[in-house]
Image (cartoon, rainbow, N blue to C red):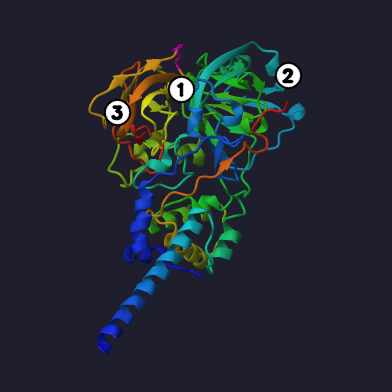
Amino acid sequence: MIRALFATGILLGAAWVVASAAAADDKSTAALLAGQLPDDPARPLVQGKCLLCHSAEYVTSQRLTEGQWQKTVEKMRKFGSPATDEEAKAMTAYFARYWTPDLPPPRVVRAAPPKGSVPGK
Amino acid sequence: MTLDRRQFLKSSLSGAAALACWVKVPTLARAKGTADLIRRTERPPNYESVRSTFTARITPVERFYLRNHFDLPVVDVPKWRLNVHGLLEKPLSLSLANLQRMPQATVEAVLQCAGNGRALFTPHVPGVQWRYGAMGNAEWTGVRFKDVLALGGVKQEAAFVQLQGAERPTMSTTPPFIRAIPMAKALHPDTLLALKMNGKPLAPARGQPVRLVVPGWVGDDWVRALVDIEVRADEPKAFYYDAAYRFPVTPGAPGAPIPADQMKPMTKLNVKSLLGSLSDGDRLTPGVHQLAGVAFSGEAGIERVELSFDGGRTWTPAKLDAPATAYGFRVFRHAWKAEPGSHEIACRATDSAGATQPETPVWNPAGYLYNAIERLRVEVRA
């Protein structure tokens, strides 16, 4: 009896761990789909080496394999991103960890025409 | 806090939920106020039109997509000059007033980004993740390019025209946006240096004061805020011509690399249609629904659009609005009697040269020219 209760306790505990992890994962997926850059040692690198020229959606809207991320980072370095070899490696790993081919499409952001896109009256 | 998403997707219950979510494409709700665009990237500004835009022939400027490689240039219009040089008898430096005094022509034509539909390719490819709305149809008014070239006197050996606008990359190490078109297309009477879009002077993001209009051809050639035109005997060695905006001569397997010598510059748009009045996942009440969409094809014009309500087993011709134009949107309509149940709706356009939309897109490494037949699932319930 005690053994059975103990086993049930372990099972319930395990279920709680799985459920919490699932809830946290749903939350982190939602944050990714909303275009956020998750906390990570590579995040300040992205801000310093990528966002000089473009906004973060250039990262957060992509759904790529590690090989594709590597090629993209190399292309951006050729274009002038001031990332060292180590920084490029760290950013590639960061991108490949979160913005994977199986991540759902980003949340749709509706917007009014931006400045300069409609002729003046 | 960092979580290894992939691990959870594979091992936990939420994985199943997330994968189920992947199948469901986000639904584009009705326009609220003036928020008729979808922002893909804020800087530089890349915005696509919402789906409901594509039920009318002419796309209003405020609903028209925007595509930029770099930040918008600031053009001082009174000081702006268009320099035309290279293989000419006489180089030109033209002001806006010079161009305004020349004979003006109007052409209706679809402008579509090469990457429209890129997000729909499998496997995924990098680039702005356009879905349906990086296209629009406008009336473009301006000077015929051939008239400007005639002012300079094109030399016999001229074969290409190189084009550059006022925009510049943030970093000097980033390649500038330089394109080229063959002389034959430059001299075509419908190719314009446009000063107006839908009857109004071009806004800064639309290419103020002058943009190239290359009817029937892919948007990368429609260079905005033109400042430099070089008449050449050869093709330029410039990244956005020599390496980017190329399409495989022979399609390969999806995801497979394609040798550089098998990649050629894109020219004409391929045939395409979009049902603008419905979105995947829509719920409708039983009864008659007026469906509408647009179809277009490079230089050929649309011959017919057919609709299927049974997953492609049978096809019904849609009614085409007049007028038929070579380069513009052709609006199609169909009064659909919706019976209760789940329906797979597809539309398929065929152009006057007999080209039709494929079942599967031609996968290519940069995700250009997506034109596969789209299939929408709608639920009809009382």
Q: Is residue B193 above or below residue B166?
A: above
- Report how far apart the C-alphas of labels 1 and 2 lie in the structure: 28 Å
Q: Secondary structure at mark 3?
A: loop
Q: Secondary structure at mark 2?
A: helix
What residue type is disc 2 on? Answer: Ala
- Report how far apart the C-alphas of labels 3 and 1 lie in the structure: 30 Å
Marks 3 and 1 on same chain: yes
Residue A61, disc: none
> To which residue does mark 2 refer?
B97
User: How far from the left and from the top, in percent, is residue B212?
Assistant: 57, 25
- Label 2 neighbourhood size at 10 Å, few (<14), some (14-19), many (20+)? few
Visible in this render: residue B186?
Answer: no
What residue type is disc 3 on? Answer: Phe
Specify which label sits upstream in the sequence, 1 or 2. 2
Residue B216, disc: 1
Residue sticking out furthest to the right:
B78
